[in-house]
Amino acid sequence: MNRSNFNRAVKTGIAAWVAAVFAVIMMVPAASAQDVDFGYRIYKDKAECWACHGWAADGLKDDPRSPPGPSLRETAWDEESLTEVIMCGRPGALMPYHDKFAYTDTRCYGIVMTDLPVNQRPPMAIQTLQKREVAALVAYLMATVVMAGEVTLEECVNYWGEGAQACQRLGAGG
Ligand code: HEC
């Protein structure tokens, strides 16, 4: 093998290796199944997202006393922006913040609470969440509701379990 053939072989080898590594990286799911499952439990049991956004995050709130939250199914959210809204809430709106220390320093939108006029201050969530809980919740939302389209019967049964009353409007028997 002369020198230039050798160089070419090395380059091809490197290219194949890079392609292989890249393929492996692409196969690793963004979030593990455990994260998604943990996130489901946060959504359902610990956080109260469903009260305002609905169990399917479709904007049909599940608690009549709660303010309506918009559907989370129709926006192409990414992890980072979802995390920010959940951690920091929305100034000027009724979306609560879930980071216990939000607005005590400038971690949220670069402001502290007293920077906001009283009527613009977002409420604190009834249950604040740890970082890893928010990460799991975001994994769950990304996997199940973001850009998910119409709510399906399958989704309902996954959420509520087989034979749930809540799924009858979607065509479940019983
Ligand atoms: C007390 C009711 C309430 C609760 C509880 C609540 N939200 Fe919200 N949420 C709202 C409202 C109201 C808005 C709209 C804010 C606005 O007008 O900008 C909102 C906005 C959002 C947005 C931005 C939507 C958009 O299209 O701009 C996301 C994402 C979101 N909420 C996720 C969550 C998650 C996840 C939880 C649970 C951890 C949660 N919310 C809990 C009321 C609530």
Image (spheres, rainbow, N blue to C red):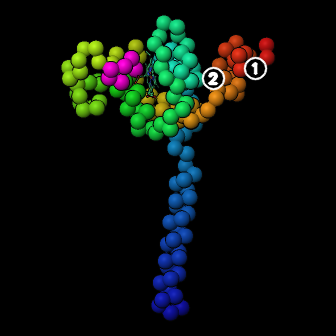
Does 141 sit above or below residue 13?
above
Question: How many labels, in total?
Answer: 2
The part of the chain drawn in magenta is: 90-95
Q: Quadrant of residue 162?
A: top right
Q: Nearer the viewer, mark 2 or mark 1?
A: 1
Secondary element at image label 1: loop
Q: CA distance from mark 2 to mark 1?
A: 15 Å
Q: Earlier in the sequence, mark 2 or mark 1?
A: 2
Between residue 68 and residue 134, name the one nearer to us.
68
Residue 96 appearing in the image = no
Q: Residue furthest left?
A: 114
Q: Residue at x 45, y 38 (%)?
A: 79
Q: Which residue is mark 2?
A: 159
Quadrant holding ligand 1? top left
Q: Which residue is mark 1?
A: 171
Three-letter amino acid code of the residue under disc 2 = Tyr
Three-letter amino acid code of the residue under disc 1 = Gly
